[in-house]
Image (spheres, rainbow, N blue to C red):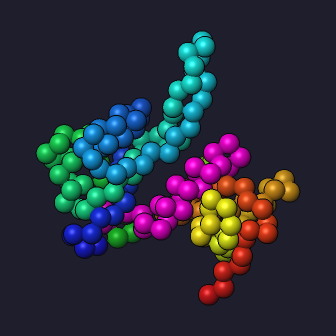
Amino acid sequence: MTEQKAYWFVAKTRHGAELGVRNRLTQLGVENFVPTRARHASRGKGMVEEPLLTSFVFLHATKDEALNLIHYCGLKINLVNDCATHRLMFVPDKSMEDFRRVLDASIEEGGLIDKPLSVGEKVRVTKGILKGVEGYVLELQGRIYVVVGLLNCLFARARVPRAWLEKITN
C-alpha cells in the first residue's frame, strides 16, 4: 500500500449509523459507498432506504485521509484490519467498480448473496450496462447470473443473458 494512492477502505460503524456516516462522508467530499435498497415503511409512510450490509461503509481515500477522518473530523468509524496481513483492509478499484455495477443493475433480481458459492466458470460480460464486468457464472432455477465478490466474503449477482457472457481463459 502506497501512502499517496487512494484505496477503497472497509470501515465499520455502529449498527444503524451507516446512512449518517455516508451522508457525513459526502459532506466532507469523500467518495463512499453503502449498498442500500428501498423498502416500504410501516404504516404507509412511503419508501425508506435501508443498508444491505449492517455496520459497513466503504470509503475511497488515501491512508492518511482515512485516518484523518477518524482523528480530526470525529467520524465514528473503525477501519477494518485484514486478519491475514494485519494491515488495513482495502478493496481493489476494479472489484469495487464491478460490485457496485452489479448491485445497481439488478437489486430486485439479484442483490447480495450471503454465503460463499461453489466455483463456476470465470466469465466477462460482453454487452449491456454490465459490459466489462468479470465474475463467475451461476445458474439458479434456470436463470443465469454473473456473480462478483469482494474480499471473498461479500457477493453480488445480476441476471444476464447467457449469450452476453464469454469464458475467461488465463
Q: Residue at x 53, y 26 (%)?
A: 48
x and y, in percent, of residue 165 in the image: 72, 71
The reply, left or right, for residue 165 in relation to residue 55 is right
x and y, in percent, of residue 19 in the image: 40, 35
Q: Residue at x 17, y 51 (%)?
A: 68
- Magenta span contains residue 108: yes
Question: Which quarter of the figure has residue 86?
Answer: bottom left
Q: Residue furthest bottom?
A: 170
The reply, left or right, for residue 168 in relation to residue 10 is right
Tally the numbered discs.
0
x and y, in percent, of residue 44 in the image: 60, 13
Q: Residue at x 79, y 69 (%)?
A: 163
Q: Which residues are magenta?
A: 86-110
Q: Residue at x 39, y 69 (%)?
A: 84
Q: Residue furthest front?
A: 128
Q: Is residue 115 visible?
A: no
Q: Residue furthest right?
A: 142
> Foreground: 66 or 131?
131
> Foreground: 96 or 76?
96
x and y, in percent, of residue 122 in the image: 66, 74
Q: Quadrant of the C terminus?
A: bottom right
Q: Is residue 119 above or below residue 55?
A: below
- Magenta span contains residue 18: no
The reply, left or right, for residue 128 in relation to residue 143 is left
Q: Is residue 51 visible?
A: yes
Question: Which quarter of the figure has residue 99?
Answer: bottom right
The reply, left or right, for residue 16 in relation to residue 70 is right
Q: Quadrant of the N terminus?
A: bottom left
Q: Residue furthest left?
A: 72
